[in-house]
Image (cartoon, helix red, strand yellow):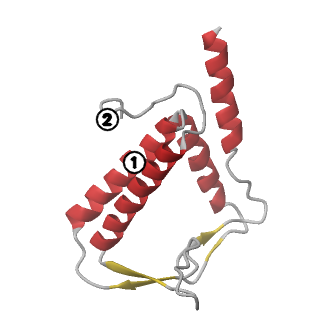
Amino acid sequence: MQKAGQATPTTPKIPDEATRILRAKLILEEALETVEALGVHVTVDTNRAGRTILDRNEGLTFEASGDVDLEGVVDGCADISVVTIGTLIAFGVDDEPILEEVDGANLRKFAPGSYVRDDGKWMKPPDWRPPDIMGVIDRQSALSEATAD
């Protein structure tokens, strides 16, 4: 990122609009390439006014559409990792503690009361607690401030 002239702050902060748009484009581009390599076609529905509706999985239809490109899937997953970690770097966030926090929350999904939905998605138990993302970010900020002194 530094070789490309992109900012890599050492403390958590929100980057400028141009950086946020660039990161969004990179993530979406790599995700779409990976979906294509998976042999899946995604259709985006439009509303009556002809505007695209895109709200997470709302308005999206997924169907197998062709051959799977194993190399493309692996390359795409690696590229997604690179651009998402790069996005954390653009926000001045250390990825390792965040990934550990999210991984812990994902593992808590397997507690009593969880179940598998018909489409294969694992559903959280009633007492599941989400990852404490802001706690991790606040600790990173505090650590940065302490080492700056």
User: Relative to 77, does residue 38 appear above or below in the rendering?
Assistant: below
Extreme-right residue of the structure = 127
Q: Residue at x 50, y 85 (%)?
A: 45
What is the secondary structure assignment of the residue under circle 2?
Answer: loop
Alpha carbon distance from label 2 to label 1 = 13 Å
Extreme-bottom residue of the structure = 48
Query: Which amino acid type is shown beneath numbered disc 2?
Result: Ala
Q: Earlier in the sequence, mark 2 or mark 1?
A: 2
Q: Residue at x 40, y 34 (%)?
A: 6
Q: Residue at x 22, y 70 (%)?
A: 69
Q: Position of residue 146 (x, y in %)?
A: 66, 14
Q: Nearer the viewer, mark 2 or mark 1?
A: 2
Q: Position of residue 26 (x, y in %)?
A: 39, 54
Taking depth in this image into account, of 145 and 67 the one nearest to the observer is 145
Tell me: 57 left or right of 75.
right
User: Relative to 143, does residue 61 appear above or below in the rendering?
Assistant: below
What is the secondary structure assignment of the residue under circle 1?
Answer: helix
Q: Residues within 10 Å of mark 2 (few under 14, many from 20)?
A: few
Q: Position of residue 19 (x, y in %)?
A: 47, 44
Taking depth in this image into account, of 119 and 56 the one nearest to the observer is 56
* Quadrant hosting residue 5: top left
> Where is mark 1, residue-wise?
83
Q: Position of residue 117 (x, y in %)?
A: 60, 79
Q: Residue at x 44, y 43 (%)?
A: 85
> Where is mark 2, residue-wise?
4
Extreme-front residue of the structure = 49
User: Relative to 96, does residue 80 appear above or below in the rendering?
Assistant: below
